[in-house]
Image (spheres, rainbow, N blue to C red):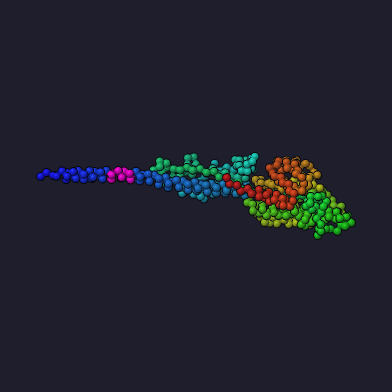
Amino acid sequence: MSTPSCLTQERGILGDRVFIGASRRGAAAVLIVAMMIVFVVLAAFTVDYAYMQLVRTELRIASDAASKAGAEALARTENVDFAKAEAIRYASLNTVGGTSYRISLDDVTDGRMVEGQGNSNRRGFVANQFPFNSVRVNARTGSGATHPAVPLFFGSVLGVNTFSPTQQSTAGQQQIEVCLCLDRSGSMLFDMSGVDWVYPPNNPLLSNFTAWGTMWQNHLSPPHPTASRWAVLRDAVQLFLDEAAGSNPQPRTSLVTWGSDYTMPVNPGTVFRAATLDVALPPQANFAFTANRQQVTNTVNQLGSRPMMGSTNLSAGLDLAVRQLTGTNAGSLSSKVVVLFTDGMWNDGRNPLLAAQDARNAGVTVHIVTMLTADQADLRQAAQLTGGRYYNAANASQLASAFREIAKSLQVVLID
């Protein structure tokens, strides 16, 4: 019996349907496989990329820790070999790619952080420049480095089996030595009007020199405790010490005051020297800023309870300050700063530019603050010659701002 044509056609149709369905399933399988390959590659890339970022962060942390440790050791001991050893040791306390990070002596460089040139405020690192105040760590991995390249999880999939990041970190921490070099000439008894020979009224410390006249009675007495130029300076010095207390490291601070050689014209004929060391620079061993700060404060207060005499031998004060910062207690790698204050124009002793040249040659930076005078070009030049700044204050507020700004500039913990 023959098969009806309609059935044959149906079978043909059914056969076609079976054939078409199998073809579609094969194409979907190929697509799924392709998509899985893409997914695996993307997953591998995502995982390894995230891991690479993690390794970069680990390397940054390790290099920063190493450079900071080296800089701290350098400032504390002034021993270059020990500083490098500490940098290597602290690097090893961190992990990079799952293993303790390792650097070599060749990866650690001592140098000096210097101020930016021109209009740039950014400090720059100069390798091997003495005196050292900074340590640079060149953190490497892979070929030529002590630490091996970091293996990736899916390197075989991506065709790259390892990752070799690099990082450079620079840190500077330098001991700071400061000498406050303060004018104690006779004009420090005057008031803040800017007029010579005008004294604050109602001075409770007025001495009994009535036979000499009112002006001499004021001139032979201690400064007014709140309204004299010395009182204004005293308050500015206190602001400086308060600000310096927040520095890291805190500065070892000495005090020099100056005027000129002078003998008081009354019995017992007290003699004033051109410059005196009132607080010596503390030794580095067992230094405590709190005690140092209190000693300077007490001494400035004590000086304010005595008469002040003499002319303005500025160079005598600067010379003594430089000798103090380069003397027995001074460190060979420390940053040395003189903060010189005067309310007048120098009229005794040698030219301050000569003293500034000597300070520069000794590696001492001199900031100069004048008050109630015209801008003094020679003192501005003297400060700039040493890498310091010049301030000209017209009142107590500007004087306080100048001392505060100088104190803020002492901070020399630097990370690059």
Looking at the image, which is closer to me, 329 or 17? Answer: 17
- Decide whether the magenta segment is chiefly helix, strand or loop: helix
> Quadrant where the C terminus lies?
top right
Q: Residue at x 75, y 41 (%)?
A: 378
Residue 184 x %, y %:
78, 51
Residue 62 x %, y %:
52, 48
Question: In the rendered view, does 291 fall on the left or right side of 203?
Answer: left
> Quadrant where the N terminus lies?
top left
Outermost residue, front side: 6
Outermost residue, right side: 211
Question: Can residue 32 be found in the magenta stretch?
Answer: yes
User: How many marks on residues?
Assistant: 0
Residue 210 x %, y %:
88, 57
Q: Residue at x 62, y 45 (%)?
A: 133
Q: Residue at x 58, y 46 (%)?
A: 415
Question: In the rendered view, does 410 fall on the left or right side of 207?
Answer: left
Q: Is residue 197 above or below residue 117?
A: below
Question: In the rendered view, does 7 fall on the left or right side of 220?
Answer: left
Span highlighted in magenta in the image: 24-33
Residue 375 x %, y %:
75, 44
Residue 227, can we see it? yes
